[in-house]
Image (cartoon, grey):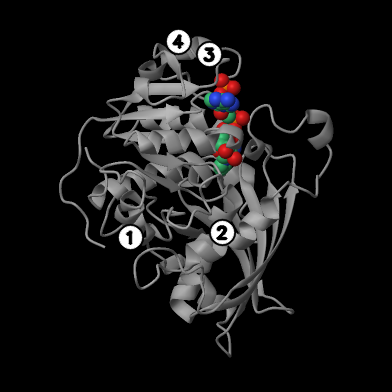
Amino acid sequence: MAGSSVTPTNVPVGVLGATGTVGQRFIKLIALHPYFRLHALGASARSAGQPYHKAVAGRWKQTTPIPQAARDLIVHACVPEPFQGCAIIFSGLDADVAGDVESAFRRAEHAVFSNAKNHRRDPQTPLVVPLVNPSHLSLIPYQRSIQSPPLQKGFIVTNANCSTTGLVVPLTALEKAYGPLDAVMVTTMQAISGAGYPGVPSLDIMDNVVPYIGGEEEKLEWETSKILGGITLDGTTFDLHAESPLRVSAACNRVPVMEGHTETVSVRFTKRPPPTPQQVRETLEAFTCAAQAPLCVPSAPKQAIFVHEEIDRPQPRLDRDFQNGAGVNVGRIRECPVLDVKFVVLSNNVAIGAATSSIMNAEIAIAMGLVSL
Ligand SMILES: NC(=O)c1ccc[n+]([C@@H]2O[C@H](COP(=O)([O-])OP(=O)(O)OC[C@H]3O[C@@H](n4cnc5c(N)ncnc54)[C@H](OP(=O)(O)O)[C@@H]3O)[C@@H](O)[C@H]2O)c1
């Protein structure tokens, strides 16, 4: 994958859903970004018409103050007109509205990078985890060509569900080294912030584990196939890992953790004999991705997978902010008496699981020459 040698400057971006959990993380990251510049913000009618700092008064939940670049921007309704002039649109919209709103922005020739589930299954919409499958962005020109009327600049790219994102990074490293995986069993312990704000009532989650998150297990099971699969030979859609269907069984739980999804994972390889836990450890540590090189995008982590040696790590409170939440933590790699190898994964659901993924996807699309600046 070729990288552009020209670093862009001063790229105006818009954020839809700017007042929410993911939207606030976008604001925080973009305000510090080397070339993205906040240009327009959108949210619901509850927030529209107010300066951003008033719209989020009492619900700014970041550990740093509202960035100056956002404070006085007026929050708009999520319609394309006030976003003219934005080269990139980041969406942290609620799934109840994201589908139609993001389609309208694409029709208005915007490059949309979405966190919502609505377009993930579209056969021509890349579902991209930036540490895993940025090559799927090459379907963007075809997606533009089949819109009615065909588009010059507009497209939609989605990132994955927050728990899928943490899972597929080590799975990709293992498939690259040892060939197709046969089966994966994953049990998640997902943070409360994954449900947005105000999310799960405190009386339901304190002193408790909720063994059900609506739609989550299905997302983990099918998204993994699209992300680990390729593009069909005619370049018109995704093959959903068709050559060697991977069986994924997910059990998803909400736990009283603020940020950071922990997942226990057992893997069976098709390769016999399978790799040893020590080989798996070395493979995960050595894994590098195109976002790091050759693309060298600014939000890529130095290490895509950090393998912990301590027997009781990774832990969400201690490890979720490592590398600004842009990488994935793995630990406790050991033999599995039922499948082959098991380990623990921790990823930051609002960083690499959401806003950081979108930002990195946009950086990669720019580096691949797919965004009109
Ligand atoms: N939280 C996570 O860890 C995470 C991770 C990955 C993906 N996601 C996905 O990202 C999206 C946002 O999640 P979140 O956790 O940030 O949710 P959230 O905290 O509930 O925020 C939702 C945002 O959508 C806006 N909104 C709601 N109804 C709207 C409408 N009718 N028109 C325009 N804007 C509207 C809200 O604006 P107001 O403030 O004005 O109501 C708010 O800005 C969801 O699709 C979610 O599934 C979340």
Name the residue carrying label 1: 290
- Looking at the rendered structure, the secondary structure element under dot 3 is helix
- Provide the residue designation for mark 3: 55
Nearest to N terminus: mark 3 or mark 1:
3
305 above or below 189?
below
Q: Residue at x 65, y 65 (%)?
A: 265
Q: For marks 2 and 4, give the CA distance.
A: 37 Å
Report the mark closest to the observer, 3 or 1. Answer: 3
Left or right: residue 186 versus residue 77 is right
Looking at the rendered structure, the kind of residue marked 3 is Ala
CA neighbours of label 2 inside 10 A, class few (<14), some (14 to 19), many (20+): many
Name the spot of residue 183 as percent of width and height, x first: 64, 75
Number of residues whose C-alpha sits closer than 10 Å to that of mark 1, classed few (under 14), some (14–19) or many (20 or more): many
Amino acid type for the residue under numbered disc 1: Ala
Label 1's element? loop
Query: At which x and y percent is residue 74?
Result: 41, 13
Residue 239 rendering spot, x and y as whole percentages:
47, 69
Front label number (4 vs 1): 4
